[in-house]
Amino acid sequence: SACEKGRAWAQALAVFQSMLEDGIVPDRIAYNAAISACSKGAQSAQAAELLAQMQAKATKPDATTYTAVINACGQGHHWRSALVLFGEMQRAGLAPTLVSTNAAISALRRSGRVDLAMDIFRSLEAQSLQPDAVTWTTMITVCALGQHWELALSMMAAMADDALRPDILAFNAFVGVCRDASQWQRALVSLGELPRHGLSPISATYKASIGAVAAAARWVEALHLLGEYSCAVHGASGAGPSAALLAWDAQAALLEDLTLQSGIVSRACHDGG
């Protein structure tokens, strides 16, 4: 378990293998710990192999086992395998838990299959499960990355209705899809809503927001956000002698990244004059 917590999946597997070599028959707890370590290390093949070994030795997997393997598949971007396991778990007579359902939805983050994520999300009601903050945030991210900004917006509103708060990653994903959908006003509104949710923008938030307004040739807004980002970095870096240097370094990194993406910053500075 110590290896698992340190995400040292290779070490955890080595310990597990030594158990087998010493003639110790691993129980479900030992299997789950080894599979969980593989999950945290995004080692989907090893996690699946351990599950197969477990089943071959008539050690019955439980919901924790399947959830860990589903997580491993999701971390490895094998969303089809994750969904197969999610179905296999139910066919084995194990009712989905909220954690396993969240894992299945999370596996679909970069699949583009928002329809499948919605199907799993809707199945929660049939299982008498209530979505939690992780569920909502994951769904918002799936919708945003799948370029369904209107659905992502409705998910954020529904989450607020449940008195739950999206995290900064969900906001970043949403602002990013607003940029791609030319919805720069909506991106700015979302940025302004962060304090209400107890959140502060990070570098990725400013990057997506500046990209959204600059893509719409809103150079004044782009420069304003860049200045706001500068103030935020100054505040975070403290009052020491290196504070200004840290702020300039952070700004330069953001400028360079944006310039590499679309060359918009130099045009913004020229037009904003």
Image: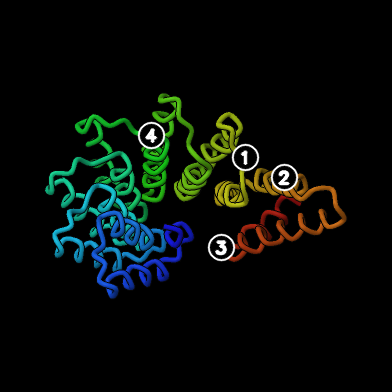
Left or right: 179 in relation to 214: left
Callout 4 secondary element: loop
Q: Residues within 10 Å of mark 2 (few under 14, many from 20)?
A: some
Q: Position of residue 189 (x, y in %)?
A: 56, 34
Callout 3 secondary element: helix
* Distance of label 4 from label 3 (alpha carbons): 35 Å
- What residue appears at the point 41 percent right and 40 percent down from the top-left corner? 134
According to the picture, the residue beneath numbered tag 3 turns out to be 261
Left or right: 176 in relation to 237: left
* Distance of label 3 from label 1 (alpha carbons): 24 Å
User: What label sits on residue 132 in the rendered view?
Assistant: 4
Callout 1 secondary element: loop
* Distance of label 2 from label 1 (alpha carbons): 9 Å
Q: Amino acid at mark 1?
A: Ser
Q: Position of residue 30 (x, y in %)?
A: 31, 59
- Say if 8 sits above or below 178 in the image: below
User: What label sits on residue 200 in the rendered view?
Assistant: 1
Q: Residue furthest bottom?
A: 21
- Of the residues tagged 2 and 3, which is closer to the observer? 2
